[in-house]
Amino acid sequence: MTVTTRFAPSPTGLLHVGNLRTALHNWLFARAQGGKFLLRIDDTDAERSREDYVDAARADLAWMGIVPDGEARQSDRFDRYEARFAELVAAGRVYPAYETPDELDLRRKILLGRGLPPVYDRAALRLTEEQRAAYAAEGRTPHWRFRLDHDAPILWDDRVRGPQKFDPAALSDPVIRRGDGSWLYLLPSVIDDIDMAITDVVRGEDHVSNTAAQIQMFEALGAAPPRFAHAALLTGSEGKLSKRLGSLGVAHFREEGIEPQALIALLARLGTSDPVEPFADPAPLIESFDFSRFGRAPARFDEAELAALNARIVHQLEPAQVAGRIPAGMDAHAWEAVRPNLTRVSEAADWWQVIEGPVAAPDFSGDDRAFLTDAARIAETIDWNDAPWAALTGALKAQTGRKGKPLFLPLRQALTGRDHGPEMAALLPLIGRERAIARLRGG
Ligand code: GLU
């Protein structure tokens, strides 16, 4: 059976880092298994779903290099849900309920007040035909609950969490459809997973109790449940569940100069027993992807770690990968010269400014000024086509006796206006003879 996974966002907001991680897990697993990865838009909630969020989700995945093998949306499939719902009604697995939210809330509070779990008491199952008719006459439309089978525990072997066991009697019969006829995500998701032959549902552990109910829905619909993998959630760097994570998405990472490869390299390994490494290509991440390496503890998402990883990715980027993002005129040599000093690609512009000039050098002492005048004179005589930095510093060392910092620092300062930066051996040919001589002269 071909492994088929799906990432199923509800387009009621932008994807945040937790969603991106779930998408990545689904994609990596499908690729590792030679399977398929689908994007499913869970847009049953017409009021809160927005088309621009659908577009943004696609664009965010594309930015990460995640291309789905297919796409579906729940709003196209309402007829299908209606048909399968009718089967469940006929089989007595869904039932109408008339309680108002306030009534339910009150019952929950009473149970909690008695120290009991706030499980729905199934009062609606005990309604007589007359009582239902009376509600209908009052103009109340029912919402619908899925009747959990209480006869046996719900069991599954989670790819991350291991063997799972739920007592169905400890769960409320889940509401699957609202009074206005709109769907909650639970049942449509199961119908889709069956129709799309999803073999593996990969999502966050906030869905674990949904899974228990959904396993019974698969069975009620005559299908074998897929395998499940519930990853532990992300926490902020402060160690607690952080609101900030909910607002961190692709737009933020792009603004921060984060490369998609860095985000992928971090999210693929975060919370696993494999080390986070700066893979500029996802192939090794796909190859090594294994749910049995996932830990049960929440994984700490640290933006500083991401920034450090990003720098190590930038140092590997080929000129073609930064085309259009570095200054016009900056060729492959220049990119390779400055690349080791960047933490983000946009900083290449700063070094291009250093190469092109003008640069502002510090005020040098008399000694250094004389040394630089010597340097300018030597710079006029060396062969600029053959390792000019070695030639310049070699001749200066011989002539002045300077070595180490007193030799190199004033040269770097005069030539670049800075104390640190890329290798001068790589930078000097890019600055070139005329500009270098002028800068050494202090002009
Ligand atoms: N739309 C659901 C969510 O975003 C999908 C959960 C699932 O993967 O089944 O939470």
Image: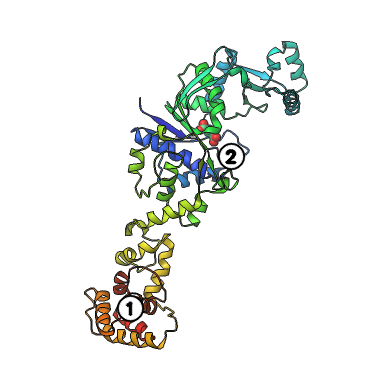
Residue 378 locus on image (x, y percent): 26, 84
Query: Residue 405's image quarter?
Result: bottom left
Q: Secondary structure at mark 2?
A: loop
Which residue lies at the image location 50% right of the left edge and 17% below the top edge? 219
Neighbours of disc 2 within 10 Å: few (<14), some (14-19), many (20+): some
Disc 2 + disc 1, Cβ < 8 Å: no
Determine which residue is flagged by label 2.
Answer: 49
Query: Residue 33's image quarter?
Result: top left
Colour scheme: rainbow
Q: How many marks?
A: 2
Residue 310's place in the image compared with 364, above or below, is above
Residue 25's place in the image compared with 370, above or below, is above
Q: Which mark is residue 198?
A: none
Q: Secondary structure at mark 1?
A: helix
Q: Position of 105 compared to 320: left or right?
A: right
In this rendering, does residue 73 appear at all? no
| Quadrant of the drawing holding the N terminus | top left
* Distance from the alpha carbon under mark 2 to that under mark 1: 65 Å
Hey, what amino acid is under mark 2?
Ser
Front-lying residue, 367 or 436: 367
Residue 42's place in the image compared with 341, above or below, is above
Disc 1 beta carbon < 8 A from ligand 1? no
Neighbours of disc 1 within 10 Å: few (<14), some (14-19), many (20+): some
Determine which residue is flagged by label 1.
Answer: 407
| Quadrant of the drawing holding the C terminus | bottom left
Residue 114 locus on image (x, y percent): 74, 22
Q: Position of 55 compared to 27: left or right?
A: right
In this rendering, does residue 109 appear at all? yes
Residue 352 locus on image (x, y percent): 39, 70
Query: Residue 407's image quarter?
Result: bottom left
Hey, what amino acid is under mark 1?
Leu
Which residue lies at the image location 63% right of the left edge and 38% below the top edge? 47
